[in-house]
Amino acid sequence: MGDWRDARGAYQGNVPFSTVVLARQSTPKVARWDVTELVRGWLDGTFPNLGLLLRPVADTFGAHASFHSREARAVSDAPRLIVNLADVQPPAIVIPSADVWLDCTTAYALGARDKLRVGPHSFSALHFNTHAQGHAPVH
């Protein structure tokens, strides 16, 4: 994982590859992002695979979202990247090879935890090893 580029190629830019609006809720729900263009770029070499950065794209008024990490107690709760390759069925399901919660108010990263957090001063980074998936086109 390393420096990120946004959807327009700017280092640490503000144009996301994908966004999702999360509503305040009392029960956990699955959040999905369509990162097809990013993963296609990883597989065809357009973008280096430096991972995904989850961060708010608008003022969230202090709200935070929590997500299971790869260290989740139940493997089925871990984040996953579902890759649909044109010539492979079923889709490849990839668990992050690394993830971390970055609390921007300290000098510490909060890895090896079962949760990731995203909010005004909290970002999360995930890395998926897509090299094992081959280089067939993504649907």
Image (spheres, grey):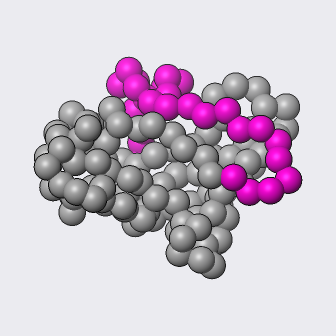
Looking at the image, which is closer to me, 89 or 101?
89
- Left or right side of 42 for 18: right
| Image vertical order of residue 112 relative to residue 23, above or below | below
Q: Residue at x 84, y 38 (%)?
A: 62
Does 63 appear in magenta? no
- What residue span does the magenta drawing correspond to? 1-29
Q: Give coordinates of residue 100: x percent, y percent.
A: 56, 60
Q: Is residue 64 left or right of residue 51?
A: right
Residue 67: x, y in percent? 65, 57
- The C terminus: image quadrant: top left
Magenta stretch, main secondary structure, is loop
**Horizontal and vertical percent for residue 61?**
85, 31
Say whether residue 103 is visible: no
Q: Quadrant of residue 64?
A: top right
Q: Horizontally, is 64 left or right of 5 in the view?
A: right
Q: Which residue is situated farthest in the front direction here?
A: 89
Q: Residue at x 29, y 48 (%)?
A: 84
Q: Residue furthest bottom?
A: 73
Q: Is residue 8 left or right of residue 78?
A: left
Residue 99 location, x and y as percent? 51, 61
Is residue 27 part of the magenta span, yes or no? Answer: yes
Residue at 52%, 52% (x, y): give it. Answer: 125
The answer to which of 62 and 88 lies nearer the viewer is 88
Query: Is residue 17 positioned above or below 27 on the image?
Result: above
